[in-house]
Image (cartoon, rainbow, N blue to C red):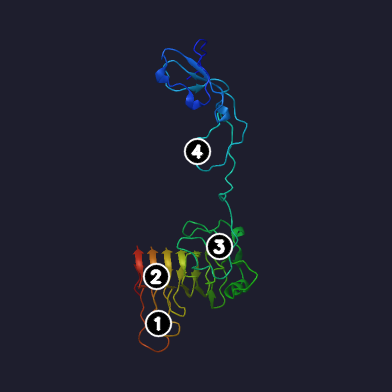
Amino acid sequence: MEAQLATDTWLPSVNTVALLPAASGLDSNKNYLCKVLNDPVSANNIIWQLVAGASIWNRFGDMASPSSVNPLMDGAATPGTMSQFSRGDHRHPADTGRAAATHTHALGSGAGQVNAEPPGASRPGHTHIPAEAGAAPANSNEYTFVIDSNAALMAWANNAAGNNYSRVLIKAGISSGSWDVNISDGRTLLVVGESGSSLPINIIGTGDDRQRFHNVTVTLGFNNCNNLTNCVGTGSGPTGNGFNNCNNLTNCVDTGGTAHQNANNAFNGFNNCNNLVNCVGTGGTGIAIGTGNAHRFNGFANCNNLVQHEPQKR
C-alpha cells in the first residue's frame, strides 16, 4: 500500500510501536501519521502511517533505504528485525558447516574402526566410491593402483606397503600365478576389470559394504565379497565355489570349475549368497579330487533373495 501524505491527521507521538493507536478507534475515512520516539528497536523510531480504511500501521519515513549489512548464512528461522530491504543482486555466504558437492576424505587405516560405530554411520577416515551399483571411474587416471604386470599383481596379492590400493584397475593380459588375494583389511575399496581381463586368483574381501567389484573375472573365486556387478567366478578355489558368502550381486556368472582339494567341500556356483539379480550359477563339473562323499555340484546353494537367476545343468 503506497504511503500517502496526510496534512491534518497527526496524532500525538508515542514511545513504542506497540503504543500506536488501534485502527478500530480511529476514523476509517482519514489518513493518520504518528511518530514513535523510544522503541527498543531503533529502526522503529520513525514516522508511521495508517492509511484510510487500513487496519495496520506502516512505516512512513526512511522505509525505502537498502541495507548495507551482508546477508547472513543460513541458520535457525527468524522473521528478523531490520527495516531496510535487501537489494536484488545480494548474495548469501556459502555454508561452511557443510561439505562441498565435490570433496574427498583421507582413507582411514587405523585399527578398531570396523564395527565400532552404529549401523549406517560413516567410519572415521572413510573414502567415497561411486554410489551407483557397479559404477567405475571413467578413465585410468582416476585409479590409485593399476595391475598391468605380474609384479603389480604380486604386490597387490601380498598387500605390499607403500601402494594405494583404494581403487584398483585390472588390465587385460595378466594371467600367471595362482594366489589368494586377501583384501579383508579394507585397503582396497573398488576393483574394476578392464574388458578381457582375467586373473588366476581367489579374492577374500572384507565381508561388509566398504568394497565394490565391477567387471572382475577370476579363475578361482570370490569369498566374503559384497557389491559385485558383471563379475565372473570359476569355482575352482579352495572351496570350489565361484562366489562364497557374497552379497549384492548383479549380472554375475559362475562358469563351473572342478573340485580343488577336499571332496568333502560343496562345489557350488553361488554358496551362502544373498541379494542376487540376473545371476547364472553352474556349479562344479563333477569330478572331485580327494576322498570323501559329501561333495555336491549346485548352481545355487543356501542363497536368498534371487531375482531372474538361472541355474545351469552340467
**Residue that carries the numbered disc 4 in the rendered image:** 78
The residues tagged by marks 3 and 1 sit, at their Cα atoms, a distance apart of 39 Å
- Which one is earlier in the sequence, the residue at label 2 or at label 1? 1
Q: Earlier in the sequence, mark 3 or mark 4?
A: 4
Disc 3: CA contacts within 10 A as few (<14), some (14-19) or many (>=20)? some
Query: Split into 4 quadrants, where in the image is the C terminus?
Result: bottom left
> Disc 4 residue type?
Thr
Mark 4 and mark 1 in contact (Cβ < 8 Å)? no
Question: What is the x, y in percent for residue 4?
Answer: 50, 15
Q: Residue at x 39, y 85 (%)?
A: 264
- Dot 1: few (<14), some (14–19), or many (≥20) neighbours within 10 Å? many
Q: Quadrant of residue 294?
A: bottom left
Vertical comparison of 76 with 12: above or below: below
Mark 2 or 4: in front is 4
- Mark seen at residue 62: none
User: Are the two marked residues, 2 and 1, in contact with CB atoms closer than 8 angstroms?
Assistant: no
Measured as percent of width and height from the top left, residue 162 is found at 65, 70
Q: Amino acid type of disc 2?
A: Cys
The secondary element bearing badge 1 is classed as loop
- Assess disc 2: are there few (<14), some (14-19) or many (≥20) residues with their C-alpha within 10 Å of its C-alpha: many
Label 2 sits on residue: 273
Secondary structure beneath disc 2? Answer: loop
Please name whichever residue, 5 or 270, is drawn nearer the observer in this view of the structure: 5
Q: Give the Cα distance between marks 3 and 4.
A: 35 Å
Per the model, the C-alpha gap separating discs 3 and 2 is 29 Å
Residue type, label 1: Asn
Residue 279 seen from this side: no
Q: Which residue in the structure is indicated by mark 1?
A: 265
Q: Amino acid at mark 3?
A: Pro
3 vs 2, front mark: 3
| Residue hosting label 3 | 124
Counting residues from the start of the chain, the first of labels 3 and 2 encountered is: 3
